[in-house]
Amino acid sequence: MTTGRAAVLEDGVLTVSDVTYGAPGRGEVRVRMVASGLCHTDLGVIAGGIPFASPGIIGHEGAGVVDEVGPGVEGLEVGDQVLMSFTSCGACRGCDTGHPAYCETWAPRNLFGMLREPDSAGITREGAPVAAHFFGQSSFGTYAIADARGIVKVAPDADLVALAPLGCGVLTGFGSMWNALNPGPDDIVAVYGAGAVGLSAVIAAGLRHPAQLIAIDLVPDRLALARELGATDTIDASTEDVVARVAEITGGHGVDLSFDTTGSPKVARGALDAAAIGGTVLVCGAPPPGTEISVDIQGILPGKVLRGITMGDTAPQELIPLLVDLHRSGALPLERLEKRYRLDDIAQAAHDMHGGATVKPVIVF
C-alpha cells in the first residue's frame, strides 16, 4: 500500500483528500505523478454530462515516473519517465488493425472505468473504495495506477510538465488533423473552437501549409493566438455570421476540410452549411448522450461528409513520440497553451478552463 493525495470528485465537487493506493495488478504500472493536464472531458464528468462512479478520481493526461511495475508488463522499469494516454483491449479488430481508439470496449474501459483485470489495483479513502481507472489511469493524484497499454516511455530529460497534455487534448487535435483530414496545399481548412484541441489542430494543419487555414471561436484572445500558431484567417463567432464570413473568406468556395471541436450541434450544422462541394466535416467533443445534429439531406448530396472521430484515430505509441520530437524542435509550442496550477487549486483550474481564461491547465504535483 502507498499513501498519497488525490482530487476526489463527489456530487460535482473536487475535494483534495488523503488516499491509499494498492500495488499494480497484471498489466498495470503505478506511476508517481509529476503533472497532469485538465481536459474538457474532465469538465464533462464534473458537470454530470459523462457518467462516472462517485466518489471517484478522474484525470487522463498524466505524466510521471514509474514507481512499481505489475506482473506481465514488459518494456517499462522503475524510474522510467512516461506519458499516459487512453487504454484499449489489444485484441479486437480495431486494436489489431492499428486503431486502438476504436477498440470495441473503448467506452467502458476509458470513460466509465468498468472493465479491469481481476487483480487490478484499487484506491481507498478512509478505508472505503474510490472509483478510479478513468481512461485507464485517473491522473488527478499523487500516483496513478495505469494500464501499461496506454503508457509511452519518453527520454529521461523530457519536460514532463510541458508534455503532460499530449495524452488526450493535444493527441486528439493534432491527430485528427494529421491522420484523418490530412490537408494538402490546395485545401481550405477550418477549425471550429480554439481551445487546446482546436489549437493543436491549427498547429498540425499549419505544418501541412494548406491554401487557407481559418480558426473560429468566441474569445478574441484565442483567435489572436490561433493566428500566431498558423491560422491565416479568424472569425469571431460572437459578433460575426460564421457561414457568411466563410463564404467571403473563401470566395464562395466553402471549406474543404472542417474540424469541429466544440461538441455543439449548432456549430456542426453550421460547418456542414459552410462546407465546399465534396467537403468533409470532422467532429469530436463529448456532449451529453443523446445529443443530435440536424442534417439537411439536400445540403449534403453534393458529396459532403459528416464524420466522427475519437482520440484523433491515433495509436499513442506512434503519435506521442512524434509530438515529443516536434515539441523539442520548437514546432509544437505547448507552453503557449498552458497555465500551471497546484493540485490544491484544481477547482480553480477547472473554473478558469470552463470560463475561457485558460486554454490548457496543467496540474503540477
Image (spheres, rainbow, N blue to C red):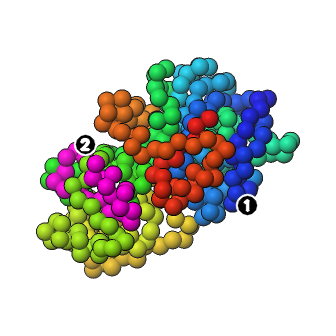
CA gap between label 2 and label 1 equals 43 Å
In the image, what residue occupies the spot 42% across and 46% down? 337
Q: Position of residue 232 (x, y in %)?
A: 21, 55
Q: Is residue 12 above or below residue 325?
A: below
Q: Is residue 195 found left or right of 246 in the rendered image?
A: right
Q: Can residue 162 be seen in this view?
A: yes
Residue, disc 2? 207
Q: Is residue 301 found left or right of 350 in the rendered image?
A: left
Q: Position of residue 212 (x, y in %)?
A: 19, 56
Q: Where is residue 190 in the image (x, y as percent from the top left)?
A: 28, 60
Q: In which quarter of the image is the C terminus?
A: top right
Number of residues whose C-alpha sits closer than 10 Å to that of mark 2, classed few (under 14), some (14–19) or many (20 or more): some
SS class, disc 2: helix
SS class, disc 1: loop
Q: Position of residue 73 (x, y in %)?
A: 60, 25
Counting residues from the start of the chain, the first of labels 2 and 1 encountered is 1
Q: Do the residues labelled 2 and 1 touch (CB within 8 Å)?
A: no
In the image, what residue occupies the spot 22% across and 44% down? 208
Q: Is residue 314 visible?
A: no
Magenta stretch containing residue 68, yes or no? Answer: no
The span shown in magenta is: 206-228
Q: Quadrant of the N terminus?
A: top right
Number of residues whose C-alpha sits closer than 10 Å to that of mark 1, classed few (under 14), some (14–19) or many (20 or more): few
| Residue type pointed to by label 2 | Leu
